[in-house]
Each structure stands twice: as structure tokens, then as C-alpha cells.
Image (cartoon, rainbow, N blue to C red):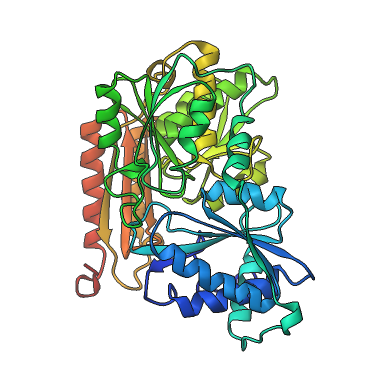
Amino acid sequence: MDKKQKKRYFGTDGIRGLVGQEPITPEFMLKLGWAVGRVLASESHSRVLIGKDTRISGYMFESALQAGLSAAGADILLLGPMPTPAIAYLTRTLRASAGIVISASHNPYYDNGIKFFSPKGTKLLDKCELEIEAMLGKRLETQDSDRLGKAERVRDAAGRYIEFCKSTIPSSITLSHLKIVVDCAHGATYHVAPNVFSELGAEVIAIGVDPDGMNINLDCGATHLQALQTAVTDHHADLGIALDGDGDRVIMVDHLGDIVDGDELLYIIARSRQQGDAKKLAVVGTVMSNLGLEHALSEIGITLHRSAVGDRFVLEKLTEHGCILGGESSGHIICLDRTTTGDGIIAALQVLAAMVKTGYSLQTLKSGMQKYPQCMINVPLAHGFDVDACVEIKSAIRDAEEGMADQGRVLLRASGTEPVIRVMVEGVDAGRVQALARQLADVVTQQQPEKQACG
């Protein structure tokens, strides 16, 4: 099957949208479950895991997917609310044919989506996604009654995953001298993350652990850090950990309430890995990773490779270069020497292990990397306008890059979700960075057909 064939439903991270609007409807989920059962669980007595976050529509879609899988003849293991990386882990260890996650990650409760994992606990290949889409175009045919799939609940799913998370740092490490605030975003980690850290000895203050189906990610978690910052300073905690709704990303806060983002966390973990490994280390970031990360890693002999934005592309680049560590500024951190996908809890544990080993605070560990000032401007994109083919824009970018030399960086890229061009400039001088970003944004605006511009 042609890998370049355009997919109708699958995006860079599964299928996602507004609940009640195609394709995020019960009817579609029923057919999707059947298609997945036919493609990924075609063998006799095959099993598919289903996990979800805490949004209210998860119940509805869980039932629809279960019905479709059963009609295809696949058995179903229901995990209930569990973090996305937990489904990846359990799919692998329970020897399932596939894992399904019902979640829209950091989106609000009225969105939902579906992600899939292979038997190895990795994201599906394009080929598999195209095969599922092809099956969706066929008529749903129910297996004979003696071949229908059965469903059962995995009662110890949370306990299995908690033990796995704890195993990703040395057993000699204890967190007994740390007071930690953990914000679970009223999401899938609410009954897991606090237990992981407390069982390792930490004093845990848990917030965002009262899901009601509609408060997931609402003014909390990795995308809204004010509540965590306040809690850390109010409780005089050593640090704070913010997870998103499905637990695959993490942002931290130091004891002063200052944010430690994905780039800084990646730096801390990379430096800790380097000190424990004689082999030359390389790390994967994205085109949006701060230039300060690249320079800080270079100073300690670590190469940074850049991928397109998205954890799928980070993983592809990790595989290409044989690396074990990569991530995004947003907090998706992948530690391939520990697990198969981005995992907020496991990434946080690697940072905490570095703190315990060195005796340094989170603030001190992050100070080895100095973030460069960054300015991003979204410019409405005219339909059909090719930025890369515009000579004037190319010239403006070249002039800006030459003016900053190795002390800055320019990036123009089309958004994957909005009709805009993202103009990003980084550099040592914040004022110059802002001025150059405005200049480039003006050039992009001026070169587009005014009547066709969006927005």
C-alpha cells in the first residue's frame, strides 16, 4: 500500500475532534472498532486493550468500540481510566494484538479522540492506519455467535503500571526527602501518579485529582500551570509536577514557582544519562526546541538532532539516529531506554533521580541551560500561497539569519491545524528578536494576495 496515500481520518496522533461531530460519533466508533478488529486482531482468540481518560464521552465510545471489536471476533480487555503510556505498556506486557486509547490529550472535555498502539507498544505505522481506513469503507459483517469476542476488566491495571513506573529508576533511590505537588489535570493519572511518587517515599500534595467528566484540563495540568505554581509556593514544596489529561506530557515547577519546560527537562535527563554512560550521546528535539537547548547540549558534548513537531516524528528521528532520548518543549519526553512512548510520569522520575543523585535542586539542575528569548507571530495564510517559493520571503529570512549569525535562529512553518504561517525568531537579544519577528511577519503578509488571505 502506498505510504503517501492521503489518510481521511488519521492525523499525526490518531483521530480527534469535537464529540458528536463526524468522525467522533458513536456510529463511527462502532465501525472503527470492527475495522480495527478485522485489521489488527484477525487471528483467533486475539485480544485488544481499551483504556480511556476521564472525559464523560469516554463511556459512550468505550461501549461502541467494544461492540465493534466483539462483532469482528476480537476479545476485549477493559482497563478503565488509565494514562496513554500505560496502555502502551500493558498492550506489550499482556501480549495484546493492539491497544486503544480514548482520549483527546490536553484538549477540553468536549473533544475526544482515539489513539492506537501496536503489540510492541508503539504507534501504528502509516500502512496499518491506511488498512483500517480501507476497512472502514466496507460493509460491517458480524461474526457467527460462536466466534464473537468477549470482554473482561483488568482489575490490577493501575497496580501493574505503578510498579513499572517505579522500576524505571534504580531501587537504591528514595524520594523521602522531597515534598512534591502533583497536578493530575483531573485526568487519567489521578489514581496513579500520586501513588507512584508517594510509594517511592515522597511527601505528595495531590491536586487535579477529582475528575467529574468535564473538568479535565480545566485551568490545571501541563497547559495551565498557575494552580501548580501557587500550590508549590504555598506548601513550600521542593517542586511541582504537572501532567496533562492523558499523562503523556509533563511540565515541572521549581521551588520558587518558576516553570521548567520540556526543553529544560530534556537537558536535565540528557546530562544525567551522559554522566552514567561512556558512549557518546545524542538527543532528538524538534524544530521548535529552544536554541539554548542545542547550545547547552553542545557544551557538554551532546548532539541535538531536530525533527518535525510531533512525538511521532521525534520517535522516527530517534530510530533513524539510534538515539534513546528525545522530546518537545511541550513536555512530551521519550526515554526509549525505559519505555516505548512519551510518558509524563516516567520522564518526571528521571528528573527526580537526577536530583537525588546530585543533591541539587531542580532550579540548579536547569540552570545549566539558558533559554534564548523567542518570539512567535502567527500570520494568516492565503489559500494556495506557497511560502517556500516566494523569493522575497527567502531573501528576508536569509538577511535575518546572516544578521544573527550563530547567535539566533529563524523558522517559518505552516501550522498543521490552522491556516497560518508561524514566524519564529530566537536570539540572544530579546528586543532584536521581537523586531526581526515583526519584520518577517510583515514581509509574509505583504507577499500574499490580500483578498485571499484567511482570518
Instruction: Give the x, y percent position of residue 371.
Output: 36, 29
Q: Is residue 216 left or right of residue 38?
A: left
Q: Quadrant of the N terminus?
A: bottom right
Residue 67, quarter of the rendered image: bottom right
Question: As displayed, is residue 209 above or below residue 405?
Answer: below
At x 42%, y 54%, the residue is 54
Question: As displayed, is residue 436 above or below residue 150?
Answer: above
Residue at the farthest top position:
359
Residue 5 in view (yes/no): no
Residue 114 in view (yes/no): yes
At x 39%, y 41%, the residue is 184
Q: Is residue 50 left or right of residue 394?
A: right
Which residue is more in the foreground, 165 or 287?
165
How many circles with numbers are drawn on the protein?
Answer: 0
Instruction: Give the x, y percent position of residue 266.
Output: 49, 32
Which residue is more in the foreground, 140 or 148?
148
Question: As displayed, is residue 72 above or below residue 212?
Answer: below
Instruction: Give the x, y percent position of residue 370.
Output: 37, 24
Instruction: Give the x, y percent position of residue 450.
Output: 20, 70
At x 38%, y 66%, the residue is 386
At x 52%, y 12%, the residue is 358
Residue 24, quarter of the rendered image: bottom left
Residue at the farthest bottom position:
139
Q: Quadrant of the C terminus?
A: bottom left
Residue 3, quarter of the rendered image: bottom right
